[in-house]
Amino acid sequence: MNILFEEDGAFKAGVVLADNAASLQVELPSGKRAKVKAANVLLRFEAPPPAELIERAERQAEEIDTDFLWEVCGDAEFAFDALATEYVGARPGPVEAAAVLLRLHSAPMYFHRKGKGRFRKAPPEILQAALAGLEKKRQQALAIERMVDELKAAKLPAEFPSLLRELLYKPDRNKPETKALEAACAETGLAVPRLLEKCGAIQDTHEYHLGRFLFEYFRNGTGFGEFAPPAEPQELPEAAVRAFSIDDAHTTEIDDAFSLEPLPEGGMRVGIHIAAPGLGIAPDSDLGRVARDRLSTVYMPGRKITMLPEDVVERFTLAEGQTVPAVSLYLDVAADLRILARETRLERVPIVANLRHHDIEPLFNDETLAAGLPDFPFRDELKRLWELATVLEAGRGAAGQKNRKDYNFVVDWSAATPQGSGRIAIDERPRGSPLDTLVAELMIVANSTWGGLLRDARVAALYRAQTAFKTRMTTVAAPHEGLGVDCYAWSSSPLRRHVDLINQWQLIAHLRGETPPYTAKSADFLAALRDFELTYAAYADFQRDMERYWCLRWLLQEDVREVGAAFLKEGLARLERIPLVVRTLSLPELPRGTRVRLAIDAIDLLGAEITVRFLESLELPGEAAPDAQIDEAGEAEGEG
């Protein structure tokens, strides 16, 4: 006696060695013996041999028309052997019955299993839906195959243009376009951006890198949509000062300005005036929510994405010739440059000049200060403020950063180069110039003074703290060891940073004797801190990445083949002309700061990568070059 039985979803046949009613001992064609439950036996037969039964049944099953089989069976549940009898028109043999069973089992869309050897035909609507799905999958597979062939032939499939950003930056692996792209990359050995560039989908490498950032942080675009205009600030007194700002040529969000009035006995009253959008924008207003969503202005060479709409910035920026709302800190300074008193006011401040670095620095620098300043507007005010700043800097125990450099990136978008639209100019200027010191020290005074004011008044504020060389945002007025102050609350850039705007709202409420918008433990306050810190860091990373990209563009634009650099450590060197750190395995271990000459072998703008080769060592430096870093003084006022 032979049996056909089901085991683990497969059909097997074997010779019965022992039949114990509930179970059978069976020998399979392979010679292996198995114990089979009687409930799993579907067919008992004498001939043909088990192996032949399976082989012949499989051949016959291939010849059975599944659609016909579905048509002839009724709607009720049935056993396979009953349908085999109806299909054959007589009592089926073992091979015929097994063939029908195999065909039923292989067509789950047509026949739903209801038990061992039992089935029920699928309802017509369910079958049609299943067949449509199967056809859709078939068509999709054909489309994927076509798209793969097109990509391999460097042709962009018609389905790709509308999905390019998604395919480049965050592909959905369930979409056929993504499956085709991944398959084509696997077959060509090219990365996704490289293959799409080859297909003509990436024609501007700058837009590719910018697009990645915009896709993640500005998915809905950089526009602001509709918003209610800022409120008109309450009537404010007008300050009897002549205030001026100091910024680079490209600054439009002018947050700070200064004034100076002589006092008897050689003293002076110094005014630090900060733009006050917080007087016209409420936290729960349309523009308050815009600032909460943006969190900061985004800076990059040649472009920026402002935190607030341009017309709102124009309304509050400290522009020359305007009298604008401001939060002012006045310092009464003795003749020996000791600060005798501090006073904070809400007022309207007349701005008489916007001084620009490129105009003032040739006249006001270390050399001209030593030799005697020439005559120029605000010469005396700048000199007195710089003298105060040097005392403030020494009082903090801070060392000047004279050996560091800043770089200005200027992109002329009207010019074109072989690398794409935009011609880059990178200008070098020493960090720690008299103007830098002046602005940074007065910003540190303002931020630390107002931080202390809010702390002492028990008004919640967001602080910048540094301990053990780790800088973080916090709601606690902790020391900032790097700056040498006991607390430091960013308050001097409310047009550019949401944290500064929050602190300004808190400060305004305190000065007016009103309830502050936030408490230290409010969910919105803590969420704003967390989101700002994460987003601000991401924006800073993006700015550094784009500066690296434009450094590579500059090297190609200027056709630089060899370049001088300073050795840093372990294969790293900093180029001399531009702020770019490169790595090369050919660089030997040298004393830190050793000048070397490197050959530029390749630059890849799509990957923002450079390949350099060590050529030779030059003379040792007189002083080791410092690592690149951003100090809090520059961070307090810097455009980025």
Image (cartoon, rainbow, N blue to C red):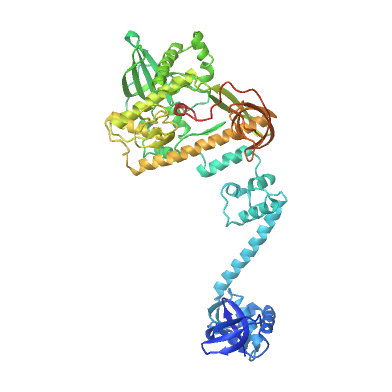
Q: Residue furthest left?
A: 513
Spot occupied by residue 69 in the image (x, y as percentages of width and height): 62, 81
Residue pictured at 52% horizontal, 84% vertical: 39
Residue 10 shows in this picture? yes
Spot occupied by residue 230 in the image (x, y as percentages of width and height): 39, 33
Residue 202 against residue 136 in the figure, above or below: above
Asked where in the image residue 17 lies, by quadrant, the reply is: bottom right
Spot occupied by residue 283 in the image (x, y as percentages of width and height): 36, 38
Quick one: 40 or 277, which is closer to the camera? Answer: 40
Residue 567 located left or right of residue 316: right
Q: Residue furthest right?
A: 153
Spot occupied by residue 282 in the image (x, y as percentages of width and height): 36, 36
The mark tally for this picture is: 0
User: Split into 4 quadrants, where in the image is the N terminus?
Assistant: bottom right
Residue 516 against residue 406 in the figure, above or below: below
Residue 2 against residue 243 in the figure, above or below: below
Residue 237 located left or right of residue 404: left
Residue 305 located left or right of residue 168: left
Asked where in the image residue 335 lies, by quadrant, the reply is: top left
Quick one: 455 or 152, which is closer to the camera? Answer: 455
Residue 364 shows in this picture? no
Quick one: 591 or 424, which is closer to the camera? Answer: 591
